[in-house]
Image (cartoon, grey):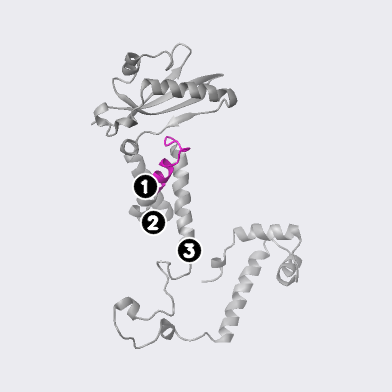
Amino acid sequence: MCKMRIVSFTLTQNDNPFKWAESDLSRLTDNQVVVGYILRTIKIETEIASLLNLYVVDHDDVTDTNKIITLQGLKNVFSQWLECLVEDPNTFLFRNPPLDKWLETKENWIKKITHKLSLAYSKAYDECLSSLYTTILHCYNKENVYMGNLHYLIVSVNNRIKIEHRYLRNRLQGEHPNAIHLDAVPSDFNGSLEDSISSLHEIIGGAEDPSVQREKTLEVFSAIKADLLEDFSEREIDQIINSPGYLPNTLYRKLLKWRKSHKREDYVE
């Protein structure tokens, strides 16, 4: 079984889908069938050229014949594209090939990207692979995403993993996979019908001594103030802490910018 491949054509007035016959298309594709395409303009030195990329595969490898693009279909698309160029010279039209054929050609690329993601985020290979496949499926189901733009897919999967990481880090409710409510009882985990203690509060202990809590609060305050002093004056910090009303717009925007790079978890364990 041959994998899907791409054949490229620089179109001219005398060599374009309008001029092709069925025999010409068969010759240009080595008797394979078209299952995807992209029409766009490219710059060659100082000239603007029209480029047509066709995704082709053996006819017997197409499980759904409705995915085959005929010569008449290419002519219709080419006509539509020429009309669009009048309004926007950067217009491109595409149809992604069948997902299973696309995945066959990108097997090595998927392994390479998954390995990089695993190293970058210190996550298990299978977790990163799952995130990548989910991203690919999500993008493929969008009508405005060209699957040949691999850079877009890489950015998308990185964003997905970052969002997942932020979601798990910030969620402190019981549905977080690594969090347990303190009002839970041992039987919630070991299947026992009776408990010798009423909740996990009893294992951890009661409320912390107020003096210890105050000391911790002062430590956190000192750490935050030390960081603030790198960007704010003493007077500005006093305004931030003690202002009874709204902060001046300039100071408020400056504080918002500071907060983007300083998270609460940086100071509270």
The kind of residue tagged 2 is: Lys
* Magenta stretch in the rendered image: 132-148
Q: Position of residue 103 (x, y in %)?
A: 33, 39
Is 112 or 39 nearer to us in this picture? 39
Q: Are marks 1 and 3 in contact (CB under 8 Å)?
A: no
Report how far apart the C-alphas of labels 1 and 3 lie in the structure. Answer: 23 Å
**Is tag 2's residue or tag 3's residue first in the polypeptide sequence?**
2
Name the residue tied to disc 3. 169
Is 239 or 91 nearer to us in this picture? 91
Left or right of 51? Residue 71 is left
Name the residue tied to disc 1. 133
The kind of residue tagged 3 is: Arg
User: Which numbered mark, 2 or 3, is in the foreground of this view?
Assistant: 3
Where residue 210 sits, quadrant-wise, is bottom right
Where residue 164 sits, quadrant-wise, is bottom left
Q: Tell me: residue 103, above or below residue 216.
A: above
